[in-house]
Amino acid sequence: MGRKNSIRRRQHAHKPARQFDKYEYYLNSVQAPDTDVVFMRDTYKELRKKKPHTLREDFCGTFSISCEWAKLNREHFAYGVDIDPEPLEYGRSFYLPQLTRQQQERVDIICESVLSHDLPKVDIIAAFNFSYFIFKERKILLDYFTNCYRTLNKEGLLVADCFGGSLCNSPNKEKTKHKGFIYEWEQESFDTITNHARYNINFKLDTEKFWRKQVFTYDWRMWSIPELKDIMADAGFKKTHVYWEQADASGEGTGDFIRQQTQAPDDQCDAWVAYVVGEK
């Protein structure tokens, strides 16, 4: 039985915005930054037997993960990197002010390409929300992972989320009801020869009769777990690990991720989410 809500990752209870705010509705529907930072902290402690201090959130958008990292511990420092100034400005206006002055001083936002060689070195690099799927060519993804390896500290980790499953091999739609609105994940197309796919995020507010279509759109190359592990190895990572989402009795994802070498025979699913972690 497939994990129907896996691609949406995890339910996360935020208070919906009073006015339509695409970034707020995205956070309410897709992200769980407070649990993301706990997962990365605990994974680092599991693999390295010590605490991490510095995080770089690549493709950070509104850098909500960076803010949560700073809130998690007063010894935590975060860097958010994104080439698009619009979501960065949103984060500066809405998320950064929610931090204390001391927490704000431990968040540094950089408007630059994740391929830049001048990025700060850190303990953990997070490549979340599948954003690196924008790199459709193996060479470019290798360049990115190589740059991650170069800009990690000696015992650093690269943590990249990914998704897939048979459900992703054809157009489909999945709706999820939240308080005050409906979130729709729409797969518009999939090309079996290239593994290129197009996705949209749509919203329907309870107070409106119409759908807000293509609020976010994605033109991606679907990368498999074996491909990601191989490319990380080519980039220099000495070990890679897969953290697989666990399922409940009905086959739905629980939001708990356990390190596994192989998929359990009884854990076949048509939509899955996992993390691939590279050790420097």
Image: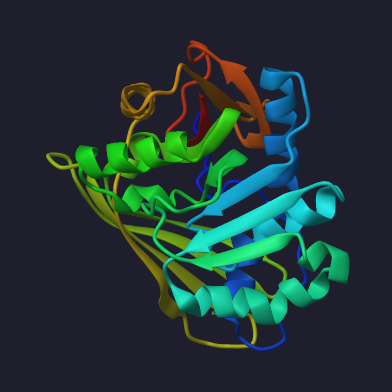
Along the viewing direction, whichever of 114 and 176 lies nearer the viewer: 114
Horizontally, residue 50 falls left or right of residue 157, namely: right
The percent position of residue 250, horizontal first and vertical second, equals: 64, 30
Q: Residue furthest front?
A: 118
Q: Is residue 100 visible?
A: no
Q: Residue at x 82, y 68 (%)?
A: 99
Q: Residue at x 77, y 24 (%)?
A: 50
Q: Where on the picture, by quarter, is residue 22? A: bottom right
Q: Residue at x 35, y 28 (%)?
A: 235
Q: Residue furthest left?
A: 193
The percent position of residue 154, horizontal first and vertical second, equals: 58, 27
Horizontally, residue 137 falls left or right of residue 81, namely: left
The percent position of residue 238, horizontal first and vertical second, equals: 45, 16
Horizontally, residue 166 falls left or right of residue 266, namely: left
Q: Residue at x 28, y 49 (%)?
A: 135
The percent position of residue 211, horizontal first and vertical second, equals: 46, 80
Q: Is residue 239 visible?
A: yes
